């Protein structure tokens, strides 16, 4: 396989890259762009029991399965990790990770914080990155723009965000998604071992501010 590595020097060993974030951070856009623009990154297609959104395709965005099928996959040991997120089941099939290892490239996992913690235990060399929105305002704008969810779903996502932000310290690094291209570049360079990730402690103030702002939004608009 020919790898397009741009002007970067040869990459370090391929490792799974886990991207976790709160809803409304642009994580899925980042994961997709990373994979589309670089031959040494492949998207790990999760299985889920939630319904497809308009435009989503089975086998591309997710493996859409029913709950008995999902449970059978867990029992057969086919899931590297799984979690219930917003009332639905999501999991990373081991086959997705094996595919990347066999090809010697980075798998990109767009998963939640609970899943990231399981990958930490299951995959020794995984790189765990938490993607932060630049501000609560940017995050609310993005959630509103998606337009696929009602108020109760948005409130649920905000409550999850508060819990997820409390666990940023468990990650190898944080990336602030202020602008898409620099964010993708930063993640690519971290994964290739060219730069060290920013430690979570360095963004502790931003995380505290985000949590305070989101708590305010929940109290003032969703109670
Ligand atoms: P959505 O329904 O918006 O596509 O995803 C909801 C949440 O589930 C997101 O945080 C997404 O990253 C997470 N998610 C997607 N796939 C997986 C997976 O395989 N495992 C886990 N643990 N979470 C996932």
Image (spheres, grey):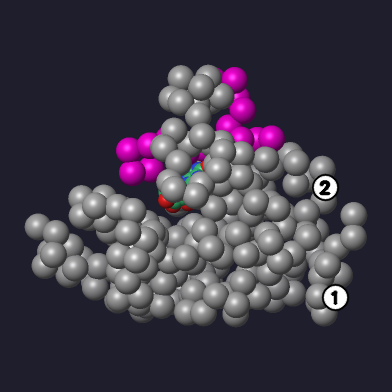
Q: Mark 2 points at which residue?
A: 103
99 vs 163, nearest the viewer: 99
Say which quarter of the image contains residue 39.
bottom right
Q: Does the magenta stretch include residue 129?
A: no
Which residue is farthest front?
A: 55
Q: Name the residue under label 1.
A: 9
Q: Residue at x 56, y 24 (%)?
A: 73
From the viewer's perspective, tell me whether residue 117 is left or right of residue 181.
left
Q: Percent x, y for residue 143?
A: 33, 63
Q: Main secondary structure of the magenta part?
A: strand
Say which quarter of the image contains residue 196.
bottom right
Q: Which residue is drawn at 30% across and 65% down?
A: 144
From the viewer's perspective, tell me whether residue 61 is left or right of residue 217.
right
23 vs 32, nearest the viewer: 32
From the viewer's perspective, tell me whether residue 135 is left or right of residue 49.
left
Q: Which residue is drawn at 90% across and 54% down?
A: 1
- How crowded is the residue under tag 1: few (<14 C-alpha within 10 Å), some, or many (20+)? few
Which residue is farthest right?
A: 1
Q: Does the magenta stretch include residue 79?
A: yes
Q: Percent x, y for residue 70?
A: 50, 26
Gap in angstroms between the C-alphas marked 1 and 2: 19 Å
From the viewer's perspective, tell me whether residue 3 is left or right of residue 214.
right
Q: What stretch is highlighted in magenta?
A: 75-95
Q: Taking the image as drawn, is residue 171 in sight?
A: no
- How crowded is the residue under tag 2: few (<14 C-alpha within 10 Å), some, or many (20+)? few
Quadrant where the C terminus sits is: bottom left
Q: What element carries label 2?
A: helix
| Above/below status of 214 relative to 167 | below
Whichever of labels 1 and 2 marks the residue nearer the N terminus, that label is 1
| Above/below status of 203 relative to 130 | below
Q: Percent x, y for residue 106?
A: 72, 55
């Amino acid at each position: 396989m020919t790898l397009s590595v741009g002007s970067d020097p040869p990459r370090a060993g391929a490792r799974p890259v886990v991207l976790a974030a709160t809803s409304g951070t642009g994580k899925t856009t980042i994961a997709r762009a990373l994979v589309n623009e670089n031959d040494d990154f492949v998207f790990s297609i999760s299985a889920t029991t939630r319904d497809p959104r308009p435009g989503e395709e089975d086998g591309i965005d997710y493996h859409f399965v029913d709950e008995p099928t999902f449970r059978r996959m867990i029992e057969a040991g086919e899931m590297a990790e799984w979690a219930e997120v917003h009332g639905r089941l999501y999991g990373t099939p081991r086959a997705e990770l094996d595919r990347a290892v066999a090809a010697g490239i980075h798998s990109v996992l767009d998963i939640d914080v609970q899943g990231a913690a399981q990958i930490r235990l299951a995959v020794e060399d995984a790189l765990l990155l938490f993607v932060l929105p630049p501000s609560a305002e940017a995050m609310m704008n993005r959630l509103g723009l998606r337009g696929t969810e009602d108020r109760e779903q948005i409130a649920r996502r905000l409550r999850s965000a508060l819990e997820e932000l409390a666990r940023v310290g468990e990650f190898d690094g944080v990336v602030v998604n202020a602008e898409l291209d620099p964010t993708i570049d930063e993640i690519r360079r971290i994964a290739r071992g060219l730069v060290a990730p920013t430690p979570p402690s360095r963004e502790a103030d931003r995380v505290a501010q985000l949590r305070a702002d989101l708590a305010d939004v929940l109290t003032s608009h969703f109670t």
